[in-house]
């Protein structure tokens, strides 16, 4: 879940995107910026306290050429305010805003074994039918589940894991 500060940055960027360029180009460019800042060499420079903010901004400006202005400006703002570590959260929150506006439901499916592409698609299909809207599934590997699935939809949880069934059985026999 994004911090309040990351949410504010994402909401401001989303508002600018809707008014000026469109949400998709900015979303794609924010992803590209996240990849650029995710490079260990770039991260090392951005996190180095001996590198001044002006030097960081100058170095980053060259790396961000080609990005649409609102995305580039947001990244530069984060860097100049020493908040570049928020970029991941901002990008995630921006994506959530885009999905929400387009009616896409974000779902996290935790499973004991990694889900392959076919299993993910089947789960998306079943959930899309159940909720009557498009679904974007994030599959998370969690060995503590033992088996089955734990599906998170916003603040709702559907727990159909072996661990949950065993806990229910233990409670019923105690």
Image (cartoon, rainbow, N blue to C red):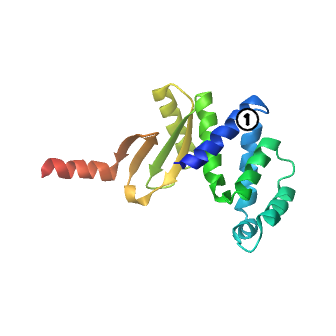
Name the quadrant containing residue 134: top right
Q: Residue lying furthest top in this view?
A: 132
Percent position (x, y) of residue 60? 81, 59
Q: Quadrant of residue 35?
A: bottom right
Q: How many marks?
A: 1
Q: Residue 42: horizontal and vertical position, in percent?
A: 75, 66
Is residue 146 visible in the rendered image? The answer is no
Residue at (36% x, 44% y) in the render: 159
Q: Residue at x 58, y 32 (%)?
A: 100
- Residue 36 visible in image: yes
Q: Check the image and report above or below for 64 versus 157.
A: below
Q: Residue at x 63, y 48 (%)?
A: 90
- Is 93 left, or right, of 22 in this rendering? left
Query: Label 1: few (<14), some or many (≥20) within 10 Å?
Result: some
Above or below, comparing residue 113 to residue 117 in the picture: below
Residue at the far bottom: name it. 50
Q: Report the residue that reaches farthest toward the left.
A: 174
Q: Which residue is mark 1?
A: 16
Q: Position of residue 116 (x, y in %)?
A: 56, 49
Residue at image location 60% in from the left, 48% down from the top: 6
For residue 51, side relative to residue 84 (left or right) = right
Position of residue 161 measured from the top left corner of the image (x, y, whole percent) = 36, 48
Q: Where is residue 55, by image quadrant?
A: bottom right
Is 143 located above or below residue 154 in the figure? below
Q: Judge left or right: residue 28 versus residue 146.
A: right
Q: Secondary structure at mark 1?
A: helix
């Amino acid at each position: 879940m994004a911090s309040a500060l990351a949410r504010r940055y994402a909401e401001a960027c989303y508002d600018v995107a809707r008014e000026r360029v469109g949400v998709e180009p900015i979303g794609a460019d924010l992803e590209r910026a996240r990849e650029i800042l995710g490079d260990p060499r770039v991260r090392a420079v951005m996190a180095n306290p001996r590198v001044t903010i002006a030097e960081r901004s100058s170095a980053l400006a060259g790396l961000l050429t080609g990005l649409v202005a609102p995305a580039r400006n947001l990244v530069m703002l984060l860097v100049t305010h020493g908040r570049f570590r928020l970029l991941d959260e901002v990008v995630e929150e921006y994506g959530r805003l885009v999905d929400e506006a387009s009616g896409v439901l974000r779902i996290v499916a935790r499973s004991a074994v990694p889900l392959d592409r076919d299993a993910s698609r089947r789960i998306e299909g079943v959930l899309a039918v159940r909720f009557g809207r498009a679904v974007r599934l994030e599959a998370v590997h969690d060995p503590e589940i033992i088996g089955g699935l734990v599906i998170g939809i916003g603040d709702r949880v559907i727990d159909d894991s072996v661990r949950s069934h065993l806990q229910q059985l233990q409670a019923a026999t105690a």
